């Protein structure tokens, strides 16, 4: 089974920065160097949650606190100037900013900006399509041994299966590269990431030969896969990746 989206990917975790309560659940002040409990996703100051570690874990859910994970998070969601939660991208300066950066008389007060969440949602939507593609290919490759075919059709079947596996390898490489970005780099490099996603889809298109239509007459596909002949497997499963991108 293909690896699915990681909870700790900057693309997905926490789900929506704009809806996060910016008060630390320990000190009740604006969280400094904010981190999120990986269990309940409540926000805390890095210093506050480190003090809780030796006692009962997360003060909200009592979940185990992973020091190495929180150290990685410590600067991930923090404004470099104010140590507060990043929620916006200043499109004039192309940097992530916090609410203090947008306050009256602040450096970015009169600049244009967009929500970081909206950018992540666009990228995540395209990534989710790649995950769906991997699920469908897993369904195809998980059909087991095909004993009711032989000869030329069997050769076509296994050739097609090998092409799909090559596609999966390409997608895994793309996913790993994108999920390797921290939040700030993810936003900064969003245009390059979009280009990478498009290049991946284009390469899939070039890799895929028209699938053997006779395979679909075998009636061995599970209901949830149920593909129909199209002349191109990529067209069935990846043509909508960029519909709303």
Image (spheres, grey):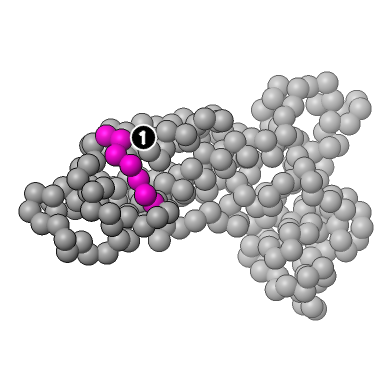
Q: Which of 153 and 98 is in front in this view?
A: 153
How many marks overall?
1
In which quadrant will I find the C terminus?
Answer: top right
Residue 196, quarter of the rendered image: top left
Q: Nearer the viewer, residue 216 or 97?
A: 216
User: On the picture, is 82 further left or further right than 64?
Assistant: right
Residue 28, quarter of the rendered image: bottom right
Q: Where is residue 91 in the image (x, y as percent from the top left)?
A: 69, 25
- The residue sitting at 64% across, 62% down in the picture is 69
Callout 1: SS: helix
User: On the picture, is 35 further left or further right than 240?
Assistant: right
- Residues rendered magenta in the picture: 225-231
User: Residue 92 magenta-drawn?
Assistant: no
In the image, residue 41 sits, relative to residue 78, either above or below, namely: below
User: On the picture, is 73 further left or further right than 221?
Assistant: right
- The residue sitting at 74% across, 27% down in the picture is 113
Q: How crowded is mark 1: few (under 14 residues within 10 Å), some or many (20 or more)?
A: few
Q: Position of residue 234 (x, y in %)?
A: 35, 38
Q: Nearer the viewer, residue 200 or 160?
A: 160
User: Residue 229 magenta-drawn?
Assistant: yes
Residue 82, quarter of the rendered image: top right
Residue at the outermost left position? 151
In which quadrant will I find the N terminus?
Answer: bottom left
Q: Where is residue 152 in the image (x, y as percent from the top left)?
A: 9, 49
Q: Which of 76 and 167 is in front in this view?
A: 167
In the image, residue 133 sits, relative to residue 28, either above or below, namely: above
Q: Position of residue 135 (x, y in %)?
A: 42, 53
Q: How would you classify the magenta stretch by its main secondary structure?
A: loop
Residue 51 visible in rendering: no
Q: Mark 1 points at which residue?
A: 235
Residue 54 visible in rendering: yes
């Amino acid at each position: 089974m293909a690896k699915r989206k990681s909870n700790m990917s900057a693309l997905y975790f926490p789900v929506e920065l704009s809806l996060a309560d910016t008060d630390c659940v320990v000190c009740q002040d604006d969280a400094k160097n904010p981190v999120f409990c990986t269990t309940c996703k409540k926000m805390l100051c890095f210093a506050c949650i480190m003090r809780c570690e030796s006692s009962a874990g997360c003060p909200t859910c009592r979940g185990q606190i992973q020091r190495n994970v929180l150290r990685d998070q410590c600067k991930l969601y923090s404004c470099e100037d104010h140590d507060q939660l990043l929620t916006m991208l200043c499109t004039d300066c192309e940097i992530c900013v916090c609410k203090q950066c947008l306050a009256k008389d602040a450096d970015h007060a009169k600049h244009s900006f967009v929500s970081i969440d909206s950018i992540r949602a666009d990228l995540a939507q395209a990534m989710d399509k790649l995950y769906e593609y991997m699920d469908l290919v897993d369904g195809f490759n998980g059909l087991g041994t095909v004993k009711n075919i032989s000869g030329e059709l069997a050769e076509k079947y296994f050739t097609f299966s090998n092409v799909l596996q090559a596609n999966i390898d390409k997608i895994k490489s793309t996913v790993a590269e994108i999920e390797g970005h921290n939040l700030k780099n993810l936003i900064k490099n969003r245009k390059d990431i979009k280009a990478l996603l498009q290049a991946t889809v284009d390469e899939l298109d070039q890799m895929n030969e028209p699938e053997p239509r006779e395979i679909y007459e075998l009636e061995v596909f599970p209901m949830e896969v149920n593909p129909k002949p199209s002349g191109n497997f990529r067209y069935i499963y990846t043509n909508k990746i960029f519909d709303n991108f």
